[in-house]
Structure formats: C-alpha cells, structure tokens
Image (cartoon, rainbow, N blue to C red):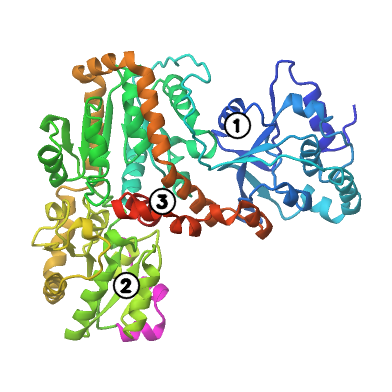
Amino acid sequence: MEINGPAAARDFGIEHSAKESKYIVFLDADDIYDDTFLECCYWTLETHPEASWTYTDSVNFGERNFFWRKWYDVEWEKQENLLIVSSCIRKQDLLEVGCFGITEKKVYEDWYLWLKLIKAGKYPIRMNSLLTYYRQKKEDSELKESNVNNKKNAMKLIEDVKSNIVQYNQAIQFPKYDYNWEDIADERIKVVTKKNNDDKIRVLMILPWLVTGGADRFNLDLVSKMDKDKFEFTIITTLPAKNEWRHYFEKYATVYDLTTFLDMKDWLSFINYIIKKNNINLIFNSNSQYGYNVLPYLKARYNNIPIVDYVHIEEWYWRNGGYSRDSTAMQNVIDKTYTCNENSRRVFIKDFGRKAREVKTVYIGVDEKKFNPDKFEKQEILQNLFTSKEIEEIKNKKIISFICRIAEQKRPYLFFEVIRKLNQKRKDFVVVIAGDGPLLSGLKNKVKANQMEKIFKFVGNMKDTERIYKISDITVNTSIKEGLALTSYESLSMGVPVVSSDVGGQKELITEDVGIVVSCLQKEEEISNYNYSDEEIYAFVEAIEKVLDNVDDYKVNCRKRILDGFTINRMIKKLEGEFEKIVNNPNKTKIENGKNLSNNIDILKHLISTFLVSNKLEYDWLVEDFNQKNVHRLETVNKKIGYEHTLEYKLKHPIVIALRKIGIYNQCKRILGMR
C-alpha cells in the first residue's frame, strides 16, 4: 500500500489500532516525550471525559531554543496553529471527524485536524507543563517545506474548514483554580500495588514547587546525592510555578506537578495511585500546605507507611509560625520532624509543645567540592563582571556582597542604610548585589537617589554564585528571619567571612572566628516597616568594619569551619540513616493513630475540601501570576479574560484589603514576592 504523506500514515495507524484502544498519541521523529507525558495525558482525559484531546507546552531545541507556551484561543487558532502534533486524542472523536482525511504531502495536516475537531464542537485540555520536546532542524523540515513549497494548497485546506467554524468551545487550561466543595475523589483509577524484588526505600516527596531557593537546593541535594541503590524518589508539587529547576530534579526523580494536569478534586486520587503503583514506603513533606492537609488521610489509608517532614524556618509573621504550626497540627501522624538548626528545634519543643524525641536537627550542609575557592580565578571573574575602567577603580578596594532574593524577609533596605552609613566613614569598598525580587527596583532607586551608583554593582540572579563569593571579601545577611541561610554555608566554604543578623540558627554556624552575628532589633511582625533603628544600623556598620579591618584573619578559618562539620555528605549520610531507621522501625503510636483515623475517612476528605476552599485567594493569585509572566497571550485574548481576573484588580479588591488588616494577606504576598 502506498502512503502519500504523514496524515495518511497516521490515518492508517488509527484504522489498524486495536479495537479496545481508547486514545491515540502521535510521535514524530523530531519529537521527544517526557517520561511522565503519557501518564499525565491519560489522567487528564480520564478525569475530563467531556474533552477530546490534551497536549502540553513544549520545548523547542536545535536550530532555535525556546519555550512554546501559548494561551489557547479558537479565534487565534484560526489564524495561527497554536497546538503541537504530540498530543493524546480520543480515538472515537478522531473517527467521528474522519481522522485527518487528507493524502497531500507537506501541508498543515495537524492544524487541519485541530480545526476539524473544533468545527465538530470538540475542545482540548492544555496542560501547562513542558513535557514534549520538538527538535528543529536546519534542513529537510516538513514544516519549512509546507511553508515554502506548498503554502497555497495548504492554506486552501485550512480556509475551507475554518470558514465553517461558527460555534465552538474554548479549552480547559491549567493552571486554574477549580475547586467548589465537590466530593474529593480518591479512587479514580484502580491500580494494584507493585511488588518489588529489592529492599529500596521508595520516598514520596510532597513539595510546593521546584524553583530557585535554599529549600529547593536542599531538596535537590537530597534526591541527587542519596544512594541510588537504596533510595528511589517520586516528587509531587502542589503550587503553580515556573519550576525552573524541574529538569535538575528529573535527573534523579520522577516528577508530577499536580497543578498542570489535574483538577484539585482529583489530586488525592492521583496520590493514592502513586503510592500503590510505586510501592511507596516513606512519605516526606516539606513546605507544602496541601501536603500537610492530606497527611491525616494518608496515615488513615496507609497506617504502616511512616511520615516525616522537614521544616526550614518558623515564621511568626506568617500564620503565627508558618510551616512549624502546620507540622505541629499534624504531629499525631508524623513520625519525625527534621529542622535545619537547633534554635528551630527548641522553638518546636518550647513554643509548640512538641515531644523532644520526635524533632531532630539535621544541618543542611554545603557541597564543599563545588564551593571550593581553589577552582576559580578571581581576575577572570572580575573581567566578566566589570569593565576595565571599573576594575582599575576597585583594584585596591574590598568587595562586600549581598547574595539573596531581594525581598522583605532579607531586608535589602536595611542593607542599603548600613552601606550608606559605612560610606560616610570609609571609601575603600564596593558592593555587589546578586539576586532579584520584588524590592530590587526599589533598592536601585535608593542607590540612584543617593548618587551611590559607583559603589553598587547589580549582577542579577546568578546560577553560579560561587563566582561572586570568589571575588568577595565579606558577605552580609540582614534578614529578619532565617532557618540557617544556605548563603552562609556557601560563603564560608568559599573562604569568605559572614556578617549576619542573629536569627534562626545563624550563630550555630557563624562563630566569632569566621564572622560576626548582629542582634536583630526588629520584630518579625513588623517585617513591612522599613524604618530601621539607628542602633541596628550602626551595629552592622561596626561589625562590617571589624571584619574588613581583619579580613585575612577571618578568612583563614572559614573553610575549615565547613570541612569540620557542615559538608553535604555529612547531611546525606545522616538522613540516609534516619530514613532507614524510620522505615524499618515505624513509630507504633503513629500506626495506631492512623488506624483510629481510618473510621473517619469522609471527615478527613472534608477537611481537605475545607483547606482547598480557604486557599482559593492564594492559589488563584498564583495562577494569574504564572499566566501573566509565562504564557503568551494576544491582546484580544487578554481582553476576553477581563480586567476582573487580573492581578492589578485583585490587589484592589475589598477582600484583599480586608485580609491585609488581619494579616492573612501576608501569605499571598509571601508566595508572590518572597519565594
């Protein structure tokens, strides 16, 4: 049989597929699927029987490299093909529209199919994760040949079908807030627990997202460095985000972002599916509020699976304790809570009444091989960051670095005031600001207004921060709150002393021979008050001066401090031992607590419903923030969305104003501006 083109070949495949086949998926030679693509497609369509097909955003690579994130809109689709051929389609809907139904070569056959489906009243689901990859070649591209050699004939086919589209349905698009007191589904798809022939510990990690940050670095170190012969990780994320670190995690773990392909009512069902399919025998939650709210249900369903969590910081300015309060609320089902410093452990015991034996400190540590000053050449880094004139000007000056997210928690405006006062006393230094965030523009405005541009160098958010440490003589941390700052570990590992606020566990790491800890004189609940006391400002100035004047004496001790007790391998070995101990000897009291809860499954599901409803404002906000920043929309499409759905409108909404007054607004503000 002669096959005339890709459309005819696909039709042949559809026609000869097994009778019981429910879905058809196309894979061209220049396309690649993520390992979870088919699984996510299946779940998306199984939970949305009204939709005809599903597709994801895509990564283009090869001749050109970019992300394909297009907002689906039928009017836009009629003018330009927004969709990708690597999609999953209901077979019955394909047959209903006659499949592709064309034999011509080098035409827009996939665009033609989408328009035929739209004409028939069908619509897709757009999953917003980057689970497909399209390789663009310089030559022999079918798409290019369609554009150049056969455009007239191709467009005639398109015009014929789109001219008959009168009524249509728009797509379901993730991320979205979609919960409205619906029944929580927990058994959408039946699965038999997988039997394994090894003794691996299979960990389900429930996290908010996979973004740039200290907590995420800890999570990445965990999955990447633990013994692969003993541990296997599956990660579920629960908040809309760009997840710029996802591809790093996927090298070592299977990742599912629930916000990209499932309605909230189906999340619990998917978690049950993962626990059974992957034979999970340890649940690890960190910084996910949704995760905390499902732990009682999971303990009721899986009494013998131990649960642990890791809390990086207690935040009194956010929900009067933040994740520490969540952890305490769920202490009856959590076998062990880990924290990154002894101060936080004491807070758990003293302020939250936790049992001492159930809370343990595991210091995060740092990769001393990566953060090794001997690996870098200072002059080369300076030449990449500064002009020749600037290098000459700073030749005999000290470099003070401020490396963090430029947000309220880090108090960048306090740092500016400290530098302003320091500049009045001495001129032998410059400042490097490495990071971005919601207060960056405000910080730059302060620098400009005070004519201090020659002192400050803004280098943006840098992936390779070790280069900044290498050129630094001192790093400064003015945070109002920390667990134990990763930047402090990194700085010391690179041989650079630290001046820091006395918050969290900073003084557990920063001893008097490697830096100075300065008393924090501002209350946490006053985080948005930028009028800092002269006493605190001058205390920082005095500390910085002392280190600058004796910098060589401090530097000689810094790296030794890390090597003696705070390396990443030490952390990994400790957690490996902890996980093995807990899995082999789960807490019997927690098992009994789980059994007692098992008679109240419906109540536990209702509590999850209550959380999802109460979380609407924050989640909806994150959805709009993600779509505004990452998804390409035409102006006409934006107008259709309406002003009432924009972030600007929500900031002015009476509910948001009311939430400001009672403090809950800080949660939204924190998520949006202080990741």
How would you classify the magenta stretch by its main secondary structure?
helix
Locate residue 559 relative to residue 70 in the image: left or right. left
N-term mark: 3 or 1: 1
From the viewer's perspective, is the residue at label 2 or at label 1 nearer?
Answer: 1
Bounds of the magenta span?
375-394
Look at the numbered disc 3 and give the secondary structure of its residue. helix
Q: Is residue 674 above or below residue 596?
A: below
Distance from the alpha carbon under mark 3 to that under mark 2: 40 Å
Whichever of callouts 2 and 1 sits on the residue coming sooner in the sequence is: 1
Q: Quadrant of residue 84?
A: top right
Q: Residue at x 80, y 34 (%)?
A: 120
Q: Tell me, for residue 655, which label it has, or none.
A: 3
Say which of 210 and 141 sits in front: 210
Secondary structure, mark 2, is: strand
The numbered mark at residue 446 is: none
Residue 92: x %, y % from top left: 75, 24
Q: Secondary structure at mark 1?
A: helix
- For residue 432, which numbered disc appears in the image? 2
Kind of residue indicated by mark 1:
Cys
56 displayed left or right of 229: right
In front here: 430 or 525? 525
Measured in 3D between alpha carbons, the distance from the residue under mark 3 to the one under mark 1, in whole angstroms, is 37 Å
Badge 1 local density, few (<14 within 10 Å), some, or many (20+)? many
